[in-house]
Structures are given as C-alpha cells and as structure tokens.
Amino acid sequence: MTVRINPSILTADFANLERELGRISSADLVHVDVMDNHFVPNLTFGQRMVEALQRVTPLPLDVHLMIDDPDRWAPGYAEAGAYSVTFHAEAAGDAVDLARRLRDIGARAGLAVKPGTRIEPYLELLPEFDQVLVMTVEPGFGGQSFIRSTMPKLGLLREAVTRLGLDIWLQVDGGINEETIVTAAEAGADTFVAGSSVFNGGEAAVQIAALRAAVAA
Ligand code: DX5
Ligand code: ZN
C-alpha cells in the first residue's frame, strides 16, 4: 500500500508560510484548507493563496474546499494549478458534473463527507472521483479529537474500491496522530492529513517520519 502524508498548513504560521513549507519537504502533498465562513464557521484563504503557495513549493497542492457552492468556485482552484480539488458532498449541487469539470481541467477530483454524512449514496459514483476524504472531525478547525465512529465508512469505501477495480485514494482528515493513523490505516485509509501533529509537535520532518513509521509498523 502506498501511504501519503499530507500536512495541513491550517496549523502553520500564516505569517511565514514559505518557511513552513520548507519544513515539510518530506511530505507527499500539501493540504490546503479553504474555508468560507459559511459552510464552516471559520475563514482562511482562497484561490490567490493557492497560486502563491505553488510558487514557493515543489510539492503538489491538495486543496480541501470547505465552502458553499463548490459548483461555482471549485473549477477556479483547478485552474489555479491545484493538484487535487476536494469539495464537500453536502455542499455540492451536481457532484458528478463538478468532478468531471475538475478532471477536464487536469486536477484530481475529490469528494469529502462530514462525520455525520453517510457514504452509501456515493459508493456507485466512485468511478467519477480520484480520491475520497472521510472527515474524522467536524470541519472548521485544527486540533480537534479524532472521531472513531467514522471508521466504518472507510471499510465500505475500501470494499467498493476493490469491487469496482478502482485506483482511488482514501483520505482521512482531522485528529490524525501516531495512534489514530494506525486505526485509520487498518480501517482502509491510505492518505493522511495531519495539521497539529506535524506543525505543533516540534520538528516537522521528524513528525512526518513518525507518522510514516507508525503506519509501516
Ligand atoms: C479541519 C481541516 C483539517 C485540519 C486538521 O477542518 O480540514 O485539515 O487542518 O487539523 P488537525 O490535524 O489538527 O486535526
Ligand atoms: Zn482539511
């Protein structure tokens, strides 16, 4: 299994993002949390930040849109050069049409679900997506505790991905540390977003290596 560690810059020092990106050069992708103060009660940054980040890191950008009306806004992030653009199922109008538009622009298309959202209605749509993000906290803030009851969704997704013969990344986001990463990997995840455990735990490269080691063990 290929494991990906995607640090979330939500917990990084916003006044020194170029330096913060330098601390995570051993990561696989950089997770970029876009929040609009509507879909979630928090506000971060938008498309111009994605363009700016891209100029100062060779790592691909994994953009997580926690915004209303992604049908309108998500393609702009793909055009801005995001490697992957993940939008929320709860906010999307026509999720399949939007995924197709993202892929046409050249981005990986991702579907995210909040902890309380069932995954069953989306399993048959999986061929339209390149990755699925199972939120393991309520979206909006870093530093929250991992919600274990989300894990059965990964089992359902892993089973459907295998049954349909797909190559889809199964991502978890929220409360991922050296312990919960093992739980999520055993449940079927292969791509791990980590904010506070990477940026608040001392040397970021050491934290990334520790997360990798925990899943490899
Ligand atoms: C939460 C964001 C996460 C957040 C994770 O809404 O989507 O990406 O940064 O932070 P931690 O790892 O601290 O839970
Ligand atoms: Zn996120």
Image: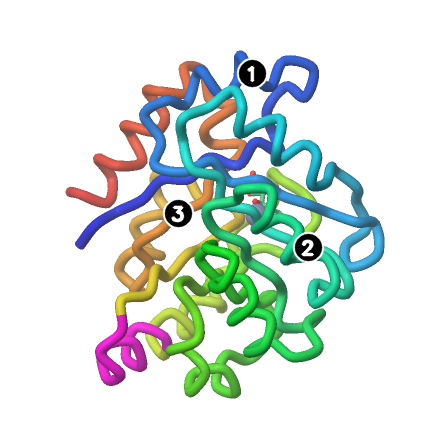
Vertical side of 159 occupied by 103: above or below: above
Vertical side of 71 occupied by 209: above or below: above
Residue 153: percent from left, percent from top: 43, 73
Q: Earlier in the sequence, mark 2 or mark 3?
A: 2
* Quadrant containing the C terminus in the rendered view: top left
Is mark 1 in CB contact (under 8 Å) with mark 2? no
Residue beneath label 3, please? Answer: 192
Q: Who's the residue at 17% across and 54% down the image? A: 1
Residue beneath label 2, please? Answer: 66
**Quarter holding residue 158:** bottom left
Element at badge 2? strand
Task: State the predominant SS element of the stretch in magenta.
Answer: helix
Mark 3, other Cα within 10 Å: few <14 / some 14–19 / many ≥20: many
Which kind of residue does numbered mark 2 sit on?
Met
Mark 1, other Cα within 10 Å: few <14 / some 14–19 / many ≥20: some
Which kind of residue does numbered mark 1 sit on?
Glu
Element at badge 3? strand
Distance of label 1 from label 2 (alpha carbons): 23 Å
Element at badge 1? helix
Q: Which one is in front in this view, the residue at disc 1 or the one at disc 3?
A: 1
In front here: 98 or 164?
Answer: 98
Chain part drawn in magenta: 157-166
Which kind of residue does numbered mark 3 sit on?
Phe
Q: Magenta span has 164?
A: yes
Q: Who's the residue at 74% across and 63% down the image? A: 72
